[in-house]
Image (spheres, coloured by chain):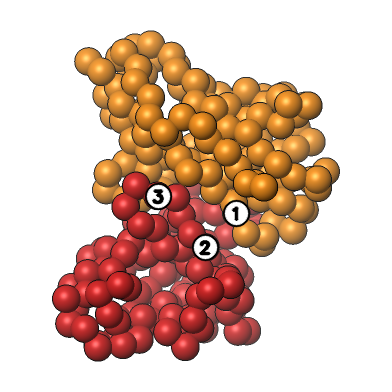
């Protein structure tokens, strides 16, 4: 089974609108971390937001928020007030276990295009 | 945030030559670094985990003699693609785990685009 599933290969959003990128995960470990990264066409991977499995509140970082629904094993990324510069690939990732040096599992990504 | 420097950003080489890619953590010590390979429009594929002062751990299907990894210090890991062939052409990207920081984030380098002629 896939550890991370991103079901939206491509998404479009109007500038200044909000958009939700879906991510579901699969793990039996009670301790894990969930991450979102942005990859523009230049290739660099930019860290956006993190959610720990024991965190009680949804993570927020500026215009990014993570809709964490533990029972459903989903960790959707919400981008508010989309900007043209948000056009990029977005990857959801998970680190299993409490060892912070454990590897990350990445989803297949969602390509977001912001329309002016 | 923490910065990871990866060099070179792009390299073009002839078939049969070796290419070394460096990954440096600039403002933190990284006991663990990761090397990924990414094909166009695909996700990142973990190649190996690089541990400072010990041998790298390679993922299944990754030839350790083909992709040599050296993590000689807490701020530097290198990936050497030996006797490169056109099928090794890809985007290689490293990440470093900032173990001492909150949130246990992996920070990524800007990647290296390798083209083997």
Q: Position of residue A17 (x, y in %)?
A: 38, 11
Asked whether, in this view, residue A114 is left or right of residue B32, the answer is left
Residue position marked by numbered label 1 in the rendering:
A104
Asked whether, in this view, residue A39 is left or right of residue B28, the answer is left
Query: Element type at marker 1?
Result: strand
Q: Are marks 1 and 2 in contact (CB under 8 Å)?
A: yes
Question: Nearer the viewer's eye, disc 3 or disc 2?
Answer: 3
Asked whether, in this view, residue A88 is left or right of residue A56, the answer is left
Q: Is residue B64 visible?
A: yes
Of residues A113 and B30, the one nearer the viewer is A113
The part of the image, by quadrant, that contains residue A88 is top left
Q: Output the letter for the chain in red.
A: B
Residue at x 49%, y 37% (from the top left corner): A48
Residue at x 49%, y 20% (from the top left corner): A20
Q: Is residue B40 above or below residue A58?
A: below
Residue position marked by numbered label 3 in the rendering:
B42
Residue position marked by numbered label 2 in the rendering:
B46
Q: Quadrant of the C terminus of chain B?
A: bottom left
Label 1 in the same subunit as label 2: no
Q: Is residue B27 visible?
A: no
**Label 1 Cα crowd, 10 Å radius (few <14 / some 14-19 / many 20+):** many
Q: Output the letter for the chain in orange.
A: A
Q: Position of residue B80 (x, y in %)?
A: 38, 81
């Amino acid at each position: 089974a896939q550890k991370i599933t991103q079901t939206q290969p491509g998404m479009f959003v109007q500038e200044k609108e909000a958009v939700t990128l879906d991510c579901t995960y699969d793990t039996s470990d009670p301790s894990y971390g969930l991450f979102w990264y942005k990859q523009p066409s230049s290739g660099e991977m930019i860290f956006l937001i993190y959610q720990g499995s024991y965190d009680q509140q949804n993570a927020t970082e500026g215009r990014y928020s993570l809709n964490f629904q533990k029972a459903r094993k989903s960790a959707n990324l919400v981008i508010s007030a989309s900007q043209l510069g948000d056009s990029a690939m977005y990857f959801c990732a998970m680190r299993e276990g409490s060892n912070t040096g454990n590897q990350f599992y990445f989803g297949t990504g969602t390509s977001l295009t912001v329309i002016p | 945030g923490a910065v990871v420097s990866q060099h070179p950003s792009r390299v073009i080489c002839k078939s049969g030559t070796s290419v070394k890619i460096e990954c440096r953590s600039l403002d933190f010590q990284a006991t663990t670094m990761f090397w990924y390979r990414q094909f166009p429009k695909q996700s990142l594929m973990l190649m190996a985990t690089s541990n400072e002062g010990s041998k790298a751990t390679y993922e299944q299907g990754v030839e350790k003699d083909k992709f040599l990894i050296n993590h000689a210090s807490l701020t530097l890991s290198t990936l050497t693609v030996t006797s490169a062939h056109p099928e090794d052409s890809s985007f290689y990207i490293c990440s470093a785990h900032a173990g001492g920081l909150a949130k246990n984030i992996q920070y990524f380098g800007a990647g290296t685009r390798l083209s083997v002629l």
